[in-house]
Image (cartoon, grey):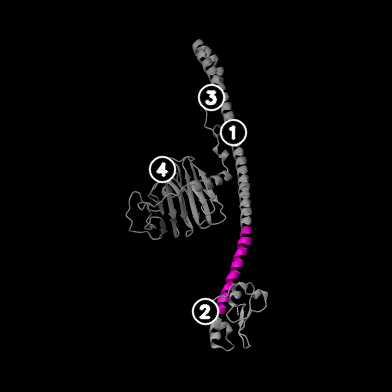
Amino acid sequence: MGGMLFSPPHSGRSSCRVRAGPGLGQYAAPLLHLPGTTCGPSPALSCSRPPLQFHPRLVTFITSGPGSAETEESQSPWNKIVDHCERLQFQSASITKYVAEVLPGKNQRAVSSASAARELVIQRLGVVRGLCESEEQRLLDRAHGEEERAHQSILTQRVHWTEALQKLDTIRTSLVDMLTHLDDLQLIQKEQEIFERTEEAEGILDPQESDKLNFNEKCIQSSLLTQLWVTAVLGCLSGTEDVRIDERTVSPFLQLSDDRRTLTFNAKKSKACADGPERFDHWPNALATISFQAGLHTWVVSVQNSCAYKVGVASGQLPRKGSGSDSRLGHNAFSWVFSRYDQEFRFSHAGQHEPLALLRCPAQLGVLLDWQAQQLLFFEPASGTVLHSHHAPFSGPLFPVFAVADQTISIIR
């Protein structure tokens, strides 16, 4: 049992026979040199230590003959101890091997993996850095080219209108000279010349506003730059705005949650809502309590439960009453919204609707307002993908605005 067998002798004298398992000599040897016993000739079992004093039960266990009740009673616990010793030795050997062989290998692989990871980071950021530098140079060149174009257009206009002024001055001087030095008969004789001079002056039109004289800011628009910028901004912002719905503005077709973050559409108009100047009385709209007129601001709306909603910003001047376009989000000059109806997505402002081709329906919709850049962006928070970007000359405070005509939408952060 357990690699070590104790067998009582069959002769009349006391003796012992021990079969030790691998590595158990140190456990077996002390058990062999007993009073009145003879050690076998095996070198592995030779007794080199002074005689030890053993408990009488141990002596009885080793020296008693077959069939002894005490031997049978004692053999099991003592062999268990030997088994435990053997297992502990194997466990120690396993741990020693783990410390000596496995851990150094693990350490070497960790060092190699860390080195490879650092190289990967440097390589990828090098690619990103190179792409950014290339895009930066391209956009700076486009800005410089657009500046030169506008400058040349202005110079051309300056030359043209300088010549026009000189021509008008010449015509005017000529006409004044005729009036000063010619009598009525001579003026009649000069009628044809006067008519030609007058007609020439009338051909010089007044200056008109032209986009060619303005710097076109769209020249620096870049989807790559926008995507990188949004990713950087979202990583730098400490958090999104604490946007809550202003219950005074909630349409009677909407139900507002207790935390003022969730709007639920109800096809039946509620009679519990007290009417007021701030409340939308027809369209299922609602404004937030907070407004912005400087800085960077972002908020996220859960839209996965709705197939008909609008999310964006609106001026405080947005009308609240009636069923006309004046109070309908995206159909007036006071609102800029991203909207969904069934599987159709679009951006709407001032009655102009721009279809948006999305690969999938976003479960969440993020809004990023950059007041300084006069830019409004809609993005998917999970991936950071920009869904639409719009530049507009904002003026006055802008409020987050919401509309829902199917199920619910919720401000989640």
Disc assigned to residue 55: 2
Marks 3 and 1, how far apart at CA: 38 Å
In screen coordinates, is 169 left or right of 97?
A: left
Magenta stretch in the rendered image: 77-105
- Seen at 54% across and 88% down, the residue is 69
Tag 2 near tag 3, CB within 8 Å: no
Q: Return the residue nearer the eye: 171 or 44.
A: 44
Q: Report the residue marked by disc 1.
A: 144
Q: Earlier in the sequence, mark 1 or mark 2?
A: 2
Question: In the rendering, at what x and y percent does residue 114 appear?
Answer: 61, 52
Compared to 82, does 354 lie above or below? above
Callout 1: 10 Å neighbours few (<14), some, many (20+)? few
Instruction: Look at the image and say whether residue 310 sits in the magenta stretch.
Output: no
Tag 2 near tag 4, CB within 8 Å: no
Q: Nearer the viewer, mark 2 or mark 4?
A: 2
Compared to 158, does 59 lie above or below? below
Q: Report the residue marked by disc 3.
A: 202
Residue 114 visible in the current orientation: yes
Disc assigned to residue 397: 4
Disc assigned to residue 166: none
Q: Quadrant of residue 104?
A: bottom right
Instruction: Look at the image and say whether residue 101 sits in the magenta stretch.
Output: yes
> Tag 4: residue type?
Pro
Marks 2 and 4, how far apart at CA: 96 Å
Quadrant into which the N terminus falls: bottom right
Question: In the rendering, at what x and y percent does residue 213 appear?
Answer: 55, 31
Question: What secondary structure is found at the residue carrying circle 4?
Answer: loop
Marks 4 and 3, how far apart at CA: 47 Å
